[in-house]
Amino acid sequence: MDEYTGASAEYTVTTRRENDEPPEAAPPPGEDDLAGVAPSADPAPDLTLSHHVTERPVYALGQIGYDFATQTRRDSVKQRMGDDAEPEEARDMLAHLDENPADAESLQWTLNLQSIPIYFLEPRGPYAAQTYELLRTFLREQLEEGVERVSIPGTIAGVGHHRSGASIPIVVPALRGMYSWTTEALVSAVADAGATTGKAAKGAADQRDAVRGGVTNFLERVYYEIRNLGIEPRERAINFAATNAFSVESVYEHAVRENMELDTIDVEPSPLCPPNSDCWDVKLTFFFPDRPAMTPRRVYRFTVDVADVVPATIGSMRTWAIR
């Protein structure tokens, strides 16, 4: 039993050991197929296929990987690659796919969290070829450029069976919301966008460095402290906030001026929302580290609408003091 437990999500996958009996043929997807993937902070989501699981949106963060549905599939790909190439070697596989892009459909592409596959990625529709090409690009960037995270919006389309015996949800990715980045590059883009042109004062440069450090801290906390599967609306909202760091940058521009540091990250339903929307308030609470005896804190709030498969921020950032 391999088990991953995060601050806001619990993921359990049962895998077959070497001495176990080979798994039986996979039955048709049933109501228990997704029972192994459920956030722990909220009530367990209803992911049974009988309750329209195929329409459930996802906005997840992780890294791209790949595997093979069966040993036979692996061997057939190996034969096409040649004697000197290994299917498990990502560089060899990418070189093969450069020459044979259609073979990308022969792989089980995965989104991994802490090296554990949490979703199969199965491009479909008229832009499937472009989506497979982008998955290959993400994998190459992870190897050659040190890309740390990718964002995968999409919808759950059923359950796939890993050759280890695990049952994992299948996500059909939405091409328009797929991005890759390193934390450093994302923070640099945010900082450069707000940099002063011309002869910048040293104080302004110091402030940009402080904002850079604050945004980095926020991203690291989202990635590691409140990591999640991106299924529940609140999870999709916080994951999108991490992808759209420009929203967070405006928060830190205010916080740095008052010499505050991040205390808590909360996500809650927004009391006001346009029709046909699903709005969630992302609230960042800051405290004064140089004034520990003082209890006042300051809240910064921005709103994310997760009604669409690719979320969007709405309105402007608000702030107020609390005790």
Image (tube, rainbow, N blue to C red):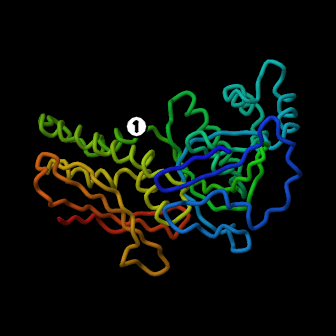
Give the left or right position of residue 74, taking residue 67 as reference: right
Q: Nearer the viewer, residue 38 or 302?
A: 38
Q: Which quarter shows the C terminus?
A: bottom left
Q: Amino acid at mark 1?
A: Ala
Q: Position of residue 282 (x, y in %)?
A: 36, 62
Q: Position of residue 35 (x, y in %)?
A: 68, 61
82 in relation to 72, above or below:
above
Q: Position of residue 112 (x, y in %)?
A: 60, 44
Q: Quadrant of residue 274?
A: bottom left
Q: What residue is shown with label 1?
A: 185
Q: Secondary structure at mark 1?
A: helix
**Outermost residue, top side:** 84
Q: Residue at x 57, y 47 (%)?
A: 4
Give the left or right position of residue 99, taking residue 150 as reference: right
Q: How many marks?
A: 1
Q: Residue at x 23, y 48 (%)?
A: 261
Q: Quadrant of residue 189?
A: top left
**Outermost residue, front side:** 19
Give the left or right position of residue 208, taking residue 179 as reference: left
Give the left or right position of residue 176, taking residue 215 as reference: right
75 in relation to 122, above or below:
above
Q: Residue at x 19, y 48 (%)?
A: 256
